[in-house]
Image (tube, grey):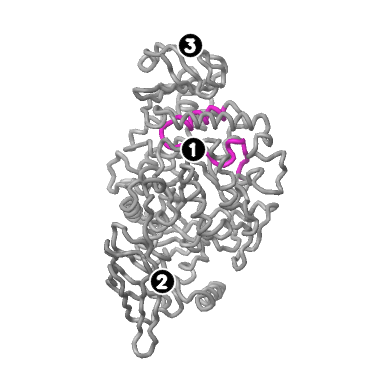
Amino acid sequence: MRTFFLTTLILLSFTIGRSQDFYPSHWFTGFKNPELNLLIRGVGLGKYTSAAIEYPGVKLVKLRKSESANYLYLDLRIDPTAKPGTMKIVLKGGADFDARTLTYQLKSRSSENGKSRVLGVRAEDFLYLIMTDRFANGDPSNDVIPGYLDQKCDRSDKFSRHGGDFKGIEDRMDYLSQLGVTTLWLTPVNENDMPRMTEWGNSVAGYHGYWFTDHYQVDKRYGGNEGYRNLSDKVHARGMKVIQDAVYNHIGNHHWIALDPPSSDWLNSSQGKNPPHHREEVFFDPYASEQDKRQMLDGWFVPHLPDLNQRNTDVARYLIQYHVWATEEFGVDGWRVDTYKYNEEKFLNDMNNALTREFPKLSVFGESWVTSPVANAYFTRNNLKTPFAHNAEGMLDFQTCFAMIASAKEENGWSNGLIKLYFSLAQDALYQDPMKNCIFLDNHDMDRIFSVLGEDESKFRMCINWLFTLRGMPQLYYGTEVLMKNFKVNTDATVREDFPGGWATDDPTKNRFLVSGRTPEQARTFDYISKLAQFRKNSPAIRSGKLMQYIPRDGHYLYFRYTDQQTVLVIANTSDKSIRPDWKLYRERVNAFTKARDVVSGELIVLSEMEIGAKNSRVLELLK
């Protein structure tokens, strides 16, 4: 009954507001793929039986009806000769219906693609992950939007929206530049017009952004489409980049697709009763059953997140066209794809091919919380021999994350402690290019790293040294640089707290955006990360150099990043006593060098006299 009532409401909205909606909302001339599959949504549109378009360079190939009476598909071909402008679409339904004329806009593509926008992200970048609602509130007027289902904004409630927005991020761009950030990665910006839902026994708002209700609308509580476009323009004007968070697998249950799907097979049919088992091994296990594969792909995460059926050609086209549209519309430089392993494999490759065909420099990397390096490598370009070959550039590297944490925390042994990081990197043989992976210490789904390490500054600094010098693209979760901390306690909200100082009502003496608002420990940490990040920007060895590691011994571990122009040594001592490295063991890389400079402190060191204190680590540039 509730679903019927909601469907009725959304259908009434067609007559109260716009009489139809287009998906894509508009399109662009000049794409290499001339095909556009235009979906038109509106009450009773299915009654029309023919369409006509008279616009130079645009041809109507076919009109198709849907199972629902509220949709029409128009398959169009847009030739390279087509110019930007507004075209008319005339719908007819025979003698019993009046003809209806619709207008649809074609825009020109940006001449800055591949120059100042849509540049891709690479190993030289430093990604900063922001949950927009929790970072900073620059415009309180958009905290509550009339007409949205969730009318609550309450910072005293950790499960509610708190009002962070794009303007808040814009106002902190100097802070991000000072930190050394090159790329902003925001959790999803798409509209989440959902009521509060039950998760882990809590009544939770969709503040995180993963419950899409309209792909083509950016959530107005953040600033809407215009606000996102402005933010992207300002980020690019600073020479920085933007990663957009994508969700292909599912939608919120108040998305119009869920309330009134064009056809019943737009959604997988488990209806939340058969969730995925989360075992990614079924995709590369030579003995796996088809049933286990289908449960992984078709199961709904939770009942309020309907699972999209990407085997349906129209669903696949809808998703692919949106991501091409959004890349062009907002100039994003790359996509991080949520829940990558739960999507149809052919669809994933088709999506990546479609995006890079139109945007050759664009980057796409996936997120799959997996249990082994083999599993992580499987979902990207790899050296495995399996029936299906994925084509994603890289993945979020959970295995290296877990290995860094274990190496800093655990007692050293044959299979514990530092050897875990060594093991993880040794398995890079699985990847075609491990430099394309994104490495990290925590994120919005994990306990915060400073807490995980027992609030131990030395262990934390050791992990930061690894994060910023290993192969791949480093990602820092917002607030880590000022030691934000917490564990998940029956909710993710405890690791998604507001950045102190992001709201006008915050205590100014604890405004972590300002030096004056940081404790001595926080100030040291921010300064350390900033200096390391700034060094990294101009270090050929770290940006593109090779990596050579040595087996850990006596509680210490070291590796080198190097090119013909530069050699960087990273050394960690987890033992309880100081060590003097035996340089004869490492002569393969240090033979030509006699000195080193600490890249953070600037201290000059004679290698033969160097001592690394207990529980200490350093990043050193070797000098002759």
Residues 594 and 373: in front is: 594
Image quadrant of residue 582?
top left
- Mark 1 and mark 2 lie on one chain; the one further toward the N terminus is 2
Query: What residue is disc 1 on?
Result: 440
For disc 3, the marked residue is 606
In the rendered image, is residue 280 in sight? yes
Tag 1: residue type? Phe
Which comes before the other along the chain, label 3 or label 2? 2
**Pick the front one: 275 or 226:** 226
Category of crowding for the residue at label 2, using alpha-carbon neighbours closer than 10 angstroms: few (below 14), some (14–19), many (at least 20) = many
Give the number of callouts. 3
What amino acid type should be assigned to the residue bearing mark 2?
Answer: Pro
Residue placed at 52% from the left, 31% from the top?
464
Residue 362 % position (x, y) = 37, 47
Magenta residue span:
459-488
Q: Tell me residue 486's x, y (percent).
A: 63, 40
**Which sits earlier in the primary sequence, circle 1 or circle 3?**
1
Q: Please say whether residue 210 is one of the residues in the magenta stretch.
A: no
Q: Secondary structure at mark 3?
A: strand
Q: Is residue 315 above or below residue 55?
A: above
In screen coordinates, is 555 left or right of 158?
A: left
The C terminus lies in quadrant = top left
Determine contact: label 1, label 3, CB under 8 Å.
no
- Mark 1 touching mark 2, by CB under 8 A? no
Q: Which residue is mark 2?
A: 262
Q: List the single residue furthest toward the top.
A: 608
Q: Which SS class for mark 2? A: loop
Crowd band around label 3 with a 10 angstrom C-alpha radius: few (<14), some (14–19), many (20+): some
